Amino acid sequence: MALTGATPLLAQEQAFVWGGEFEIGVDSTVKSDDPAAELTDNYASLSLAFEAGVANSITLFGEVSLESVTDPAETRHFDDLGLYVDELGLRFDLAAGELSVGKVSPTFAVALDAAPGFYGTSLAEDYELPEVIGATFDIRHACRRLRRGSVLCAVLCG
């Protein structure tokens, strides 16, 4: 079960937009060669994000998450919850593209969002870089062969 939403509040050229997602789920291993691996994880996750116009062409963005922060070692029910900051930074809308600085999550492909199946995102999680300190520059271009219409460049600390 997932619940999502967003509410824009506009004031002249500046805006405040927020959105969130709440998920409740059950992940169970019902049969295994190792009886200790047979467990059930009842979990919940909450994610809240915002964007706030600070000045013309400058936006403050952020996202916080509440979820289980450890893998289950035994059957558990909504345990090991932790609250952390996913993203926090400034975004500058420039003529050539969009510059983001701070704690960012650069997206290098669409498989993380579009891969089919319950575990379809497993491969994408290996090459995506969530929650890193750095800067990204999303360059706009007129190339018609690329569907998204941009190229992402990133400088990351780590």
Image (cartoon, rainbow, N blue to C red):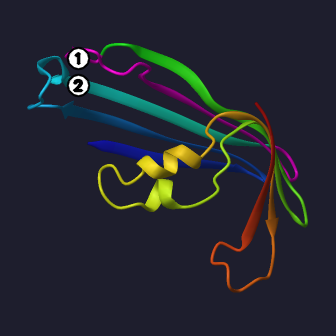
Q: Which span is picked out in magenta? A: 54-78
Q: What x and y, as percent, mark residue 124?
A: 50, 51
- Give x and y (percent) for residue 92: 85, 50
Image point (78%, 53%), residue name: 12
Instruction: Identify the residue at the far bottom of this view.
Output: 144
Q: Position of residue 119 (x, y in %)?
A: 33, 49
Magenta-highlighted stretch: main secondary structure?
strand
Q: CA distance from mark 2 to mark 1?
A: 5 Å
User: Any mark on residue 21, and which?
Assistant: none
Neighbor class of circle 1 (other Cα within 10 Å; few <14, some 14-19, many 20+) is few
Residue at 42% from the left image edge and 47% from the top image edge: 122
State the mark number for residue 42.
Answer: 2
Q: Inspect the image, locate mark 1, and give the three-letter code of the amino acid beneath it.
A: His
Residue beneath the point at 61% across and 26% down: 85
- Within 10 Å of disc 2 (Cα), the crowding (few <14, some 14-19, many 20+) is some
Q: Nearer the viewer, residue 2 or 8?
A: 2
Quarter of the picture holding the C terminus:
top right
Left or right: 52 in relation to 141: left
> In the rendered structure, are the residues bearing label 2 and label 1 in contact, judged by CB atoms less than 8 Å apart?
yes
Identity of the residue furthest to the front in this view:
33
From the viewer's perspective, is 108 left or right of 122? right
Closest to the observer: 52 or 135?
135
The answer to whether 120 is drawn above or below residue 1 in the figure is: below
Q: Amino acid at mark 2?
A: Asn
Specify the quadrant of the image occupied by residue 2.
top left
Residue 53 picture location, percent across and down? 77, 45
Magenta highlight on residue 117: no
Residue 130 as seen in the image, left or right of residue 4: right
Q: Which residue was labeled with disc 1?
A: 77
Picture quarter with the N terminus: top left
Report helix, strand or loop for mark 2: strand
Instruction: Please tell me whether residue 14 is drawn above or below residue 64 in the rendered image.
Output: below
